[in-house]
Amino acid sequence: MAAPPQLQALLKAVNALLRKRRYHAALALIKGFRNGIVLRDKLRAILQATYTHSWNLACFVFVYKGLCALQAHTQGKTYQSHSFLAAFIGGFLLFGDNNNINSQINMYLTSRVLFALCRLGVEKGYIPELRWDPFPLYTAVVWGLVLWLFEYHRPTLQPSLQSSMTYLYEDSNVWHDLSDFLIYNKSRASK
């Protein structure tokens, strides 16, 4: 069943517009925005990663609490070092394998720990308290660095970050017609 002539004419006009180099920069902005909001079909991988993460976390909690209790029982009292030692052993045993899931978890924790250590440094007086909110500057530096690394030192970035950034910042520069501009990221012929 063919589309009505008016729709065919409209699609032809839109596809002709999309091919004009004159509008490429503006259209790349639109496609980049589209790529940022499109959810890809990765449900199975997400569910597997969630299961693995939750199982590792459950085992970690068991090891951590068990080792804390053992140390407190053995020494007759709880010390701050017990928490660190129990988590150190649990982290080594359960999150020490260098895989994608553990890498994501450890990078997430690294950022949280660095923020907490900065706050602790301010609280203890090791770092002066600023009179202005440093978060906008921090954000600008992080985004500036990650895009600089992506554009000029890509292999230094984690593969999943490289893939996401390629999808957002490079794939959004390429299209042939309306189908791979809005509907699909790449033309069906190129897959």
Image (tube, rainbow, N blue to C red):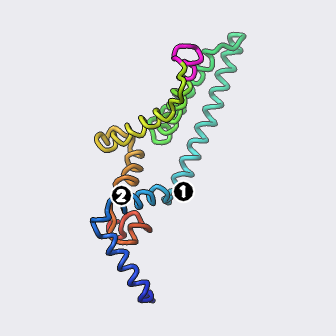
Q: Residue at x 39, y 49 (%)?
A: 165
Q: Secondary structure at mark 2?
A: helix
- Quarter holding the C terminus is bottom left
Residue 116, horizontal then vertical, whole percent: 56, 25
* 3 to the left or right of 78: left
Pointer 2 local density, CA inside 10 Å: few below 14, some 14–19, many at least 20: some
- In three-dimensional space, the C-alpha distance between marks 2 and 1, rounded to whole angstroms, equals 22 Å
Q: Residue at x 37, y 40 (%)?
A: 157
Front-most of 17 and 52? 17
Residue under numbered circle 1: 43
Front-most of 184 and 142? 142
Q: Quadrant of residue 12?
A: bottom left
Front-most of 74 and 23? 23
Pointer 1 local density, CA inside 10 Å: few below 14, some 14–19, many at least 20: few
- Evaluate whether residue 146 shows in this view: yes
| First in residue order: circle 2 vs circle 1 | 1
Amino acid under disc 2: Asp
- Evaluate whether residue 88 shows in this view: no
Label pair 2/1, CB-CB below 8 angstroms: no
Front-most of 170 and 45? 170
Q: Inspect the magenta stretch and tell me whether residue 127 lies in it.
A: yes
Q: Secondary structure at mark 1?
A: helix
Amino acid under disc 1: Leu
Residue under numbered circle 2: 171
Residue 41, horizontal then vertical, whole percent: 50, 60
What segment carries the magenta color? 118-128
Magenta span: helix, strand or loop, mainly?
A: helix
Q: Residue at x 59, y 46 (%)?
A: 51
Q: Residue at x 35, y 74 (%)?
A: 15
